[in-house]
C-alpha cells in the first residue's frame, strides 16, 4: 500500500480512537490518562494500518476509513472535544488564611456570684454577608477552639482550661471560684438580623473569667480583601455581639432572656492574618458595658 494512503489510514484510526475515548470515557483528566489516550490511539492506528496493508485490501481500507469517519462525526455530535479541555495541570485556587479572636469578659456581677446558661454570640467573618467560600471544596471555612481565662488584678489573662471539641478539656489551673471545667451546652452558626454569627452557650461563668473563642478561616485568596467582621452595609462600620441567659430549645436553636442580676461585661473581636510567621491585625472591635442584665451590643472599631 502506498505510503500516503497508509498514513491516512493510521491518522483516521488514531483520531477515531482518540475522539471516542475522549467523548465516552471522558479522557483525558490528567497526565496519566492523556498518555494512555495517546498510546491506545497510536496502537489502534498502527494495527489498522498494518492489517489493511498486509491484506492489500482496498475495500478494507475504505471500510476502516468510513468507520473512522463515523466515529469522529459521532463523537462530535456528543460534544466538541476541544471544549472538554485537556487539563494537564489542574490549577487549584490559591488559599488565604485568617484568624478570628472573640472574647467575652465577665468583669463583675452585682452579687459577685456566677451567671448560668450564658449565651454568647459574635458576628462571624463573612464575604458580602455570606459564609466565605472554603479553601478546599467540601470543607467548612471555619474551625477553632475555646480557651477559658481568668483576669487577674494586673490585667493579665491566666489560662484555666482549653478545648477543641467542647468535650475533652486541657486543664491548666483554676482561679477564683472555679473548681471544674465549664460545660458547653451549644456551639453553632446561625443567621441573624446582622448576618452570620457564632453562638456558644456555657453552663456557668464566674466574675473575672474570660470566654475566648479562636476561629481559623480558610478561604480563597480571591475573596480575602472582602472578608470582614463588619455588619454588612452598616455606615459606621461596626460589628456586634450579644450576651444573655440562654434557653436552649434544641441544638442550634434557642432564645435569650435577662439574667436575674446586673453584670458588667466587655466584648472584643479581632480579625488577623498571618504574615511572615506572625499575626497582623486586619480589624478589631470592642465595647465595655454595664450594668446590664443581658444585651446585644454594637462593637466599635478599635484603633491601633
Image (cartoon, rainbow, N blue to C red):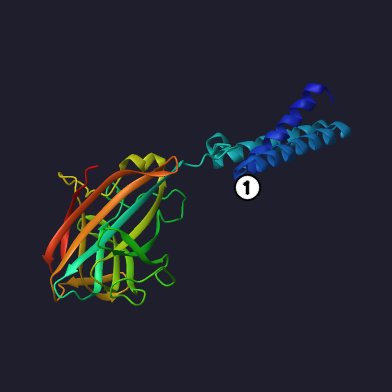
Provide the secondary structure element on which disc 1 rests: helix
Is residue 17 visible from the viewing direction of this image? no
Q: Residue at x 36, y 77 (%)?
A: 180
Q: What residue does disc 1 label?
A: 25
Q: Residue at x 36, y 74 (%)?
A: 181
- Whether 81 is drawn above or below 136: the answer is above
Q: Residue 40: where, in percent of width, then height?
A: 73, 40
- Direction from residue 226 to residue 263 in the image, left or right: left
Q: Residue 73: where, in percent of width, then height?
A: 61, 36
Of residue 7 and residue 218, the one placed in the foreground of this image is 218
Q: Residue 8: where, in percent of width, then height?
A: 74, 27
Of residue 232 and residue 283, the one placed in the foreground of this image is 283
Q: Residue furthest right?
A: 54
Q: Residue 67: where, in percent of width, then height?
A: 70, 38
Is residue 180 visible from the viewing direction of this image? yes
Q: Residue at x 25, y 65 (%)?
A: 120
- Direction from residue 291 to residue 286 in the image, left or right: right
Q: Residue at x 52, y 39 (%)?
A: 91
- Whether 37 is drawn above or below 141: the answer is above
Amino acid at each position: 500500500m502506498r505510503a500516503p494512503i497508509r498514513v491516512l489510514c493510521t491518522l483516521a484510526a488514531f483520531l477515531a480512537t482518540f475522539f471516542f475515548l475522549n467523548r465516552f470515557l471522558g479522557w483525558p483528566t490528567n497526565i496519566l490518562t492523556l498518555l494512555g489516550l495517546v498510546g491506545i490511539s497510536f496502537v489502534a492506528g498502527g494495527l489498522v494500518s498494518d492489517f489493511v496493508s498486509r491484506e492489500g485490501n482496498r475495500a478494507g481500507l475504505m471500510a476502516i476509513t468510513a468507520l473512522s469517519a463515523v466515529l469522529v462525526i459521532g463523537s462530535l455530535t456528543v460534544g466538541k472535544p476541544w471544549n472538554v479541555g485537556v487539563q494537564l495541570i489542574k490549577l487549584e485556587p490559591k488559599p488565604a488564611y485568617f484568624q478570628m479572636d472573640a472574647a467575652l469578659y465577665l468583669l463583675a456581677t452585682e452579687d459577685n456570684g456566677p451567671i448560668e446558661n450564658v449565651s454568647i454570640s459574635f458576628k462571624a467573618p463573612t464575604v458580602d454577608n455570606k459564609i466565605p467560600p472554603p479553601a478546599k471544596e467540601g470543607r467548612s471555612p471555619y474551625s477553632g477552639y475555646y480557651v477559658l481565662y481568668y483576669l487577674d488584678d494586673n490585667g493579665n489573662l491566666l489560662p484555666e482550661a482549653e478545648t477543641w471539641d467542647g468535650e475533652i478539656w486541657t486543664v491548666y489551673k483554676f482561679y477564683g471560684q472555679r473548681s471544674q471545667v465549664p460545660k458547653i451546652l451549644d456551639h453553632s452558626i446561625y443567621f441573624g438580623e446582622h448576618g452570620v454569627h457564632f453562638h456558644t452557650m456555657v453552663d456557668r461563668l464566674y466574675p473575672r473569667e474570660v470566654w475566648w473563642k479562636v476561629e481559623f478561616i480558610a478561604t480563597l485568596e480571591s475573596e480575602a480583601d472582602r472578608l470582614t467582621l463588619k455588619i454588612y452595609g452598616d455606615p459606621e462600620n461596626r460589628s456586634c455581639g450579644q450576651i444573655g441567659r440562654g434557653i436552649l430549645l434544641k441544638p442550634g436553636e434557642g432564645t435569650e432572656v435577662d439574667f436575674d442580676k446586673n453584670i458588667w461585661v466587655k466584648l472584643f473581636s479581632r480579625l488577623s492574618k498571618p504574615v511572615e510567621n506572625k499575626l497582623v491585625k486586619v480589624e478589631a472591635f470592642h465595647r465595655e458595658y454595664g450594668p446590664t442584665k443581658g444585651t446585644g451590643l454594637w462593637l466599635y472599631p478599635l484603633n491601633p
